[in-house]
Image (tube, helix red, strand yellow):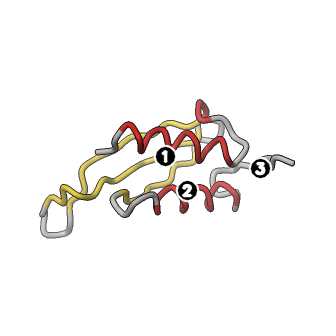
Amino acid sequence: MLSDDDYEEFRRSIRDTGLSPGDFEISTTAAWDKSQKLHLDLTVVSVRYLPTGATGTYMAGFGYYWLRNLEKHIKEGFYGTRPTTAA
């Protein structure tokens, strides 16, 4: 599962895109492979943008790589977002 530091980094990443962390819902589940083996070092993270209902799924456990992908998806408009950039 995610640590408190992971959740804080998630909120920081959202703020950095110009959006509000309160507009996102995050949930986690254990990571299983196709042979039903549990991977304790990995977590499946689902992120939902409440205003549009768009949901993305990421694999956490590789540092903050999943957050960089989330930021990229937000900037590309995957969530139906048009983030503002700070001047």
In the image, what residue occupies the spot 80% across and 47% down? 84
In the rendered image, the residue lying farthest to the top is 22
In the image, what residue occupies the spot 39% across and 50% down? 45
Q: For the residue marked with disc 1, what is the amino acid?
A: Val
Q: Position of residue 40 (x, y in %)?
A: 18, 55
Crowding around mark 1 (Cα neighbors within 10 Å: few <14, some 14 to 19, many 20+) is some
Residue named by callout 3:
82
In the image, what residue occupies the spot 55% across and 39% down? 11
Pointers 2 and 1 in contact (CB under 8 A)? yes
Q: For the residue marked with disc 3, what is the amino acid?
A: Arg
Q: CA distance from mark 1 to mark 3?
A: 17 Å
In the rendered image, the residue lying farthest to the bottom is 35
Q: What numbered label is drawn on residue 56?
A: none
Q: CA distance from mark 2 to mark 1?
A: 9 Å
Crowding around mark 3 (Cα neighbors within 10 Å: few <14, some 14 to 19, many 20+) is some
Q: Position of residue 24 (x, y in %)?
A: 56, 37
